[in-house]
Structure formats: C-alpha cells, structure tokens
Image (cartoon, rainbow, N blue to C red):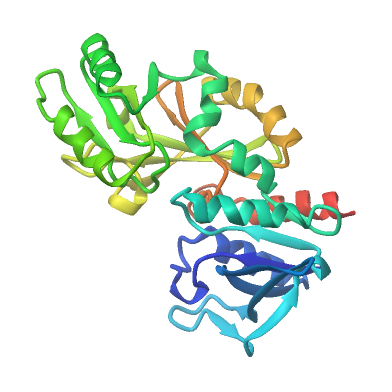
Amino acid sequence: MKIAFQMDPIGDVNIDADSSFRLAEEAQARGHTLFFYGPDQLAYQEGRMTGRGHDFTVQRVQGDHAHLGPLKEVDLSEFDVVWLRQDPPFDMHYITTTHLLDRLAETTLVVNDPFWVRNYPEKLLVLDFPDLTPPTTIARDLDTIKAFKAKHGDVILKPLYGNGGAGVFRLTPDDRNLSSLHELFTGFSREPLIVQKFLPDVSKGDKRVILVDGEPVGAINRVPAAGETRSNMHVGGRPEKIGLSERDLEICARIGPLLKEKGQVFVGIDVIGDYLTEINVTSPTGIQELERFDGVNIAAKIWDAIEAKRA
C-alpha cells in the first residue's frame, strides 16, 4: 500500500519512544511505501487534496533513522492510507486539518477517522461515561470553578486542549492560586479549563492502556517523578511494566465498541486507580514501551486492523 504520514518532522523524533516511527518501521517491513508531509503542507487545491513532502525510508539507527527523497507534491487521494499523527495542541490549525482530510473519505482510509478525532478530543469524549470518570467540571467562569474546588477540596486544573502534561496544576485545599491561574490562562486563551477531583492513586502511577480497533492490547504504568504530580513521560514520568486489571477491562468493554464504530483504530486511554481520565485519539503514544515490556508487536496489530479495513 501507499502510506502517507501527516506528522511533525520525522527527523526530530526519538526512535526509541516515538509511536509514529514504530508504525512507519512496521509498514516498511510489510512492503508498504512511505511518504511524509507536515500539517502545514496539507492543502486543498481546486478540488484536490495535496501534500508537499518526501518519500522516505526508516532504519533503527540513532541520528540516521530517516532518509528523505526529494521534495514533491502528491495527490493524497492516490494513497491507500493517511495517518493523522501530528501532536496537539488541539487548536484551530489542528481542527482545520481534520476538515480537509475528511474530503478523502471516498478514496483513502484516514487513521484515526478525522471526523471523530475532531468531535472526540481527549478530555471531552470521557464526558460520555460519567460513571467511569472522577468528578469533573469544564468551565471558563471562575465562580463555577471555585464552587467545584470548594466542594472537592483537592483538585487538578488544566487547559482543556493541552497535552503532554503542560499547564497541569494540583490545587490542594489550602492553595490560594486559583484566581491567579485563572487570570493567567484566560489572559492568553479563550478556551475553557477542565478541573477534576485529585486522585491520590496517581502516586502509584497513571496507566496508559492501548486499544486497537476497540480492543485492549496491553498497558504501561507511568509513575510520577519525585515531587511531581504529573506522570506524563514528557515531564519525567517513568514507564513501568503492568498488566490489565479487571477494572481496566471493564472500562475498555464500555468504550471499545464506540471507538471501533467511529474509526479510532489506535487509541490510548489514561486510567488512574479505578477512574478513566482521558481518551487519547489525536496522536497517542506508548507503543514502543508496551512492546518492550510485553514482547508483543503492537504495531503489527495496528497494521493488521488497517489492512483488514482496506481489504
């Protein structure tokens, strides 16, 4: 198959951690051809969806992992699969790429389905499952957020469309910074904030569960660094081997059919203790860590699902 990756610069990725690199590596091993372009090089041109980028090959050699061909423009409708793999933030630039990629629906499989990526961003899809999630409020109004904090005491405050642990604050019952943080966030963004009851179980880790076409295939545990609330690996969280608990399987059984129905082939959910906190569909990570811990080829499972859909 002809595969295009819409992603951040492939030359800058960490080959030991990046899921897009691992997906490209597995695709190449299966004989598929690879093309890379950035989201800035996606265009609608008089009825055609185009990308300006490079044919490429990959190898697991640090510092020499991607070989790019000459810059060229391609018609994306001629590709079998386009991967939507640029990192958030989930802003209007990101949303616009999903609208444009929607136009390929008749000819090309876009993974994950951009219509539902747009309508199911990480921190909003969980609202469909309130019994699985910690107490949550999404608001821009300071009084509403203050009332939530007064009720629950110890809370987590974060931007609604952030990623990688950026801008995540824990506010304990005696913390007096809520108004200042609200002023800071609303000073540079018109987006709401999300506030959730703090879950003490995060000290034991924030579990990333990987689902492929709606089915759980494994999990890794991300343990916060000493003195840190956030467990994201971007900010020093330590990945550990862990299995799927009965509660993890219960959560996956609830959300999996919806993810499969909406074309979300590769999804990473976040579970703290018994609670689902995020459903990551934009550019989930965790494949390589899971493969190393469990000895399972997760990238192959993802490509098996994609090849079955194309067939």
Q: Can you give x and y, in whole percent of width and height, for residue 281 in the image?
A: 57, 43
Residue at the image position 64 percent from the left and 21 percent from the top? 254
Residue at the image position 39 percent from the left and 20 percent from the top? 136
Quadrant of the rendering where the C terminus is positioned: bottom right
Q: Is residue 98 left or right of residue 165?
A: right
Residue 220 in sight in this render:
yes
Residue 197 versus residue 215 in the image, above or below: above
Residue 26 versus residue 131 in the image, above or below: below
Q: Can you give x and y, in whole percent of width and height, for residue 268 in the image?
A: 54, 41
Residue 291 in sight in this render:
no
Q: Nearer the viewer, residue 265 or 15?
A: 265
Q: Is residue 272 left or right of residue 10?
A: left
Residue at the image position 31 percent from the left and 35 percent from the top? 158
Quadrant of the rendering where the N terminus is positioned: bottom right
Residue 130 versus residue 38 in the image, above or below: above
State the residue lying farthest toward the front.
46
Q: Nearer the viewer, residue 70 or 42?
A: 42
Q: Quadrant of residue 79?
A: bottom right
Q: Can you give x and y, in whole percent of width and height, for residue 243 in the image?
A: 51, 34
Q: Is residue 296 left or right of residue 46?
A: left
